[in-house]
Image (cartoon, rainbow, N blue to C red):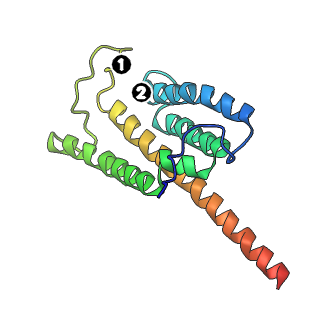
Amino acid sequence: MATKPDIMISDGPKGMTPIVKTVVRFAMGIIFMFGWYIILYGHLTPGGGFAGGVILACGYVILTLAFGKELGLRKLSDMGASIIDNTAALLFAVVPMFGFLFGWYFLNFLDKGRPFQLFSAGNIPLYNIFIGFKVTASLFAIFMALSIFGRFVSKLVDEEEEG
C-alpha cells in the first residue's frame, strides 16, 4: 500500500503560483532572521518581543498563504502553537518570581553587563524572548482559526442559499 509523501515546499497544486512560491522561499529566511534580530536586540534598538513576534507570525502566515494550509500547519501545528503560547506565558510569569526570591517581584537578578552590549539589560532579553514566542504562536493560531472559521461560515451560507 502506497503512503502519501510528506508535504514539502514544492510547486504542488496547493497554494499560489510558482512565482509567489519562489519569492516566499527566498524571503522566509530573511523574515525569520529579522524577526529574531528584533526580539534579541529589542532592549538596544526599537522593537522587542511583541514586534519581533509579529514579524515571525507574519512569516508563518505568508508561508501558509503561499503553499497552503497543510504546510503551514506542518511547520507550526495548532497544538504546537498552543503549547508554545502557554509555555511562554508561564515562563513570563515564573521569571519575575525568581526576582521575588531576591527582594521583590520583577527584580533584575541577572547581571546588567556593559551598556550597549547584547547582555546588558539583565532580565529584559528573557522577557522579550518569551513575549516573542507567545505573540508568534498566538497570532498564527488566530490566523488559522479565522481562516478555518471563514471557510465554515461560507459553507453554511452556501447551504442556506441552496435550501
Is residue 105 something one can see in this rendering?
A: no
Disc 2 crowd rating (10 Å Cα; few below 14, some 14-19, many 20+) is many
Tell whether 1 sits left or right of 148.
Answer: left
Q: Is residue 21 visible?
A: yes
Query: Outermost residue, front direction?
Result: 1
- Name the kind of residue labelled 2 in the image: Leu
Q: Foreground: 158 or 128?
A: 158
| Residue at the (53%, 37%) spot, across then down | 56
Q: Give the residue furthest to the bottom.
A: 163
Q: Secondary structure at mark 2?
A: helix
Provide residue 46's location: percent of width, then percent of height. 52, 26
Question: Which residue corresponds to mark 2?
Answer: 40
Q: Is residue 59 above or below residue 161?
A: above
Which residue is rendered at x = 66% and y = 38% of the image?
A: 11
Q: Residue at x 57, y 51 (%)?
A: 70
Q: Height in image: 137 above or below 127?
A: below
Secondary element at image label 1: loop
> Is residue 162 found left or right of 13 in the rendered image?
right
- In the rendered image, which quarter contains the C terminus? bottom right
Q: Which mark is residue 63?
A: none
Contact between marks 1 and 2 (CB within 8 A): the answer is yes
What residue is disc 1 on? 118
Residue 42 at x, y percent in the picture: 45, 27
Q: Position of residue 10 (x, y in %)?
A: 61, 37
Q: Is the residue marked by circle 1 packed among few (<14), some (14-19), or many (20+) residues within 10 Å? A: some
Q: CA distance from mark 1 to mark 2?
A: 8 Å
Front residue (pair 91, 107)? 91
Q: Earlier in the sequence, mark 1 or mark 2?
A: 2
Q: Amino acid at mark 1?
A: Leu
